[in-house]
Image (cartoon, helix red, strand yellow):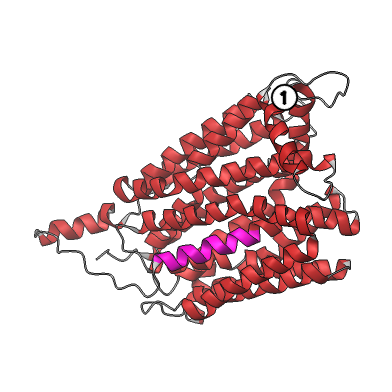
Amino acid sequence: MAAPVDPATRKRVLKVIFISLLLDLISFTFILPLFPKLLEFYRNIEAPLDAGAPPPKTLLSSILGYLNAYKAAFARPIDSRYDIVLLGGALGSLFSLLQAVASPFIGHLSDRYGRRTALLASMAGNILSVLLWVMAVDFRTFLASRIVGGLSEGNVQLATAIATDISDANNRGSTMALIGACFSIAFTFGPALGAWLSTISSVAANPFATAAAVSLFLIVTETVYLYFNLPETLPSMTKANKTNADEKKVSPAPAAVLHRTNSHFLLNLVHMTFLLFFSGMEFSLPFMTYDLFGYSSANNGRLLGYVGLVASLLQGGVTRRLPPLLSVRIGVVSCLVAFVLLARTFTVTGLYLAATCLATTSATVVMGLNALSSFEAGDGERGGKLGILRSWGQLGRGLGPILFTSVYWWAGREVAYEIGALGIAGVSLLALFGLKTPPGFVTAKPKAVKEEKKEL
């Protein structure tokens, strides 16, 4: 059995994880608001909309040809302004599907060679990915950047594994909430910073090189910070556990049989189906606000900023105090309410009510599932199990936008969101009646929660 982590070490590791993950996610979110203009830049060079001349034979022109053929298959006409949105969605799906492939391998690597080694290896891939973006004067190089990033991005799952290594049943839920808070803070400020940096031109051949260079600086800074400050936390490789083994000078006892309350298959299924519908709704939201309210990019930015801000407040003040299973249940029910509102609303007030529900969902479900999965895994398999959980989730996130927007264009907003509501209703039933609280979980006492807040 793993030796308990002393409070000083736990506090130090939490600080390192919080700072490094915040740097990583801010860097990651730089590119999100830039996708439309960035892809327009490559299209204007490699696949210009010039009816008088055939577009040059490039990788980008071929991809756009396939996307237009897909768009033309629908009975409802789809405006050409969505071509770039479709391309951005395709790249987002590719990134998620690559993550689905890579996440289990990264998790098993961390179980075998240690969290620190796996995280630093992941950071090397991230540096290469962003370096390619800095150099991306053509679409092919930019695509290579996204592929490398999709295959190497393991920071979130490894930060989750490290957080579970240093926490117990009393504080694991609040520890996961800290990771969720990093997401909310980064998604509130990162896109705005990325958009501002895109206005600073430094390389004519790549107008987005300034944003990419700052992103690279943050990633390199994060890597150096981790190298000098992050200790190994895998229980079998920590100094405390090695000292215990040396003192006993006996062969290690066979690993105890772990009795699981919730099967990992059920947790993975809930994660995948939830993100299948949730990510589809996220991707379709700008289409809906444009069609219904004539929203511009700035309007949508304010809407998403509101979601991020509310999610940050919830994670900082509410989610960290909730048991993981209760967090999941609250989140999926909130998501169901959001789908019903989005299917029926014709007012901005209704839209922001739905956005409040989505913020609640963002602040609860994924972090709660990560905590539950960690309770159902032994010390030597936790990285792999969390990697597989992330893999299933990324599979849902990769397929959701394609499937959901297809229904949206084929049958309209009401039908799409009603089908989404039915899907989330099924997820809610699984969360309410299929998942159970692990027997080892003890709800954190108020004093323990207060101490947790002081650790950062």
Q: Can residue 314 be seen from the camera position used here?
A: no
Q: Position of residue 386 (x, y in %)?
A: 42, 57
In this figure, which residue is indicated by the disc labeled 1?
A: 206
- Please say if 171 is above or below 30: below
Residue in the image at 84% along x and 57% along y: 289
- Please say if 406 is above or below 452: above
The reply, left or right, for residue 54 in relation to residue 250 is right
Q: Position of residue 43 (x, y in %)?
A: 76, 28
The reply, left or right, for residue 261 in relation to residue 147 is left
The reply, left or right, for residue 288 in relation to residue 225 is right
Q: Mark 1 falls on what kind of element?
A: loop
- Please say if 73 is above or below 415: above
Q: How many marks?
A: 1
Please tell me whether residue 275 belongs to the stretch shown in magenta: yes
Q: Which residues are magenta?
A: 264-278
Q: Nearer the viewer, residue 231 or 32?
A: 32
Q: Quadrant of the N terminus?
A: bottom left
Residue in the image at 84% along x and 70% along y: 345
Please tell me whether residue 227 belongs to the stretch shown in magenta: no
Residue type indicated by callout 1: Asn
- Please say if 356 is above or below 203: below
